[in-house]
Image (cartoon, rainbow, N blue to C red):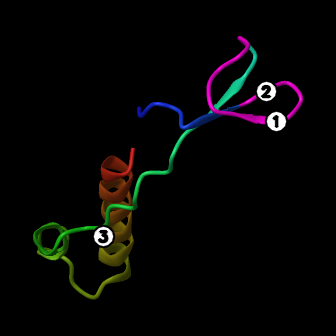
Amino acid sequence: MTEPYAWVDGDSRLQSKQTDIGDIPLYKKLPWQGLSEKEIDELTKNVIAFKSDIVDFIGRAEAKLKEKNT
């Protein structure tokens, strides 16, 4: 995980550094990572127009995106 860019203290004030053990760190949100054309091709290579195949594809696509964005 990245380093915090700021901290919120017990009085809800934004601080540039941690001043107390109870301060809450704030992290920058990483940019979203979408699927590459190669990944889309891999995920769709066996998909045909049956509902069960589409549901399976959606599940595999969601799993791949979760993997890339955690």
Query: In the rendered view, would you say 17 is above or below 29?
Result: above
Per the image, label 3 sits on a secondary structure element best described as helix
Distance CA(mark 1)–CA(mark 3):
45 Å
Residue sitting nearer the eye, 14 or 67: 14
Where residue 15 appears, as percent x and y from the top left, is 70, 32
Label 2: state its secondary structure.
loop
Left or right of residue 39: residue 7: right
Q: Is residue 41 above or below residue 23?
A: below
Foreground: disc 2 or disc 3? 2
Q: Give the residue at x 39% y 52%.
A: 66
Identify residue type, mark 3: Phe
Residue with the mark numbered 3: 57
Task: Report if residue 13 lies within the magenta region.
Answer: yes
Of residue 52 and residue 17, the one placed in the foreground of this image is 17
Q: Amino acid at mark 2?
A: Asp
Residue under pointer 1: 13
Q: Helix, strand or loop at disc 1?
A: loop
Label located before the other in sequence (1 or 3): 1
The reply to whether the C-beta atoms of the residues labelled 1 and 2 are less than 8 Å apart is yes
Indicate the quadrant containing the N terminus: top left, top right, bottom left or bottom right.
top left
Query: The magenta stretch spans which residues?
Result: 8-21
Residue 9 placed where, x, y %? 79, 27
Q: Tell me the residue that label 2 is attached to.
A: 9
Q: Which amino acid type is marked by label 1? A: Arg
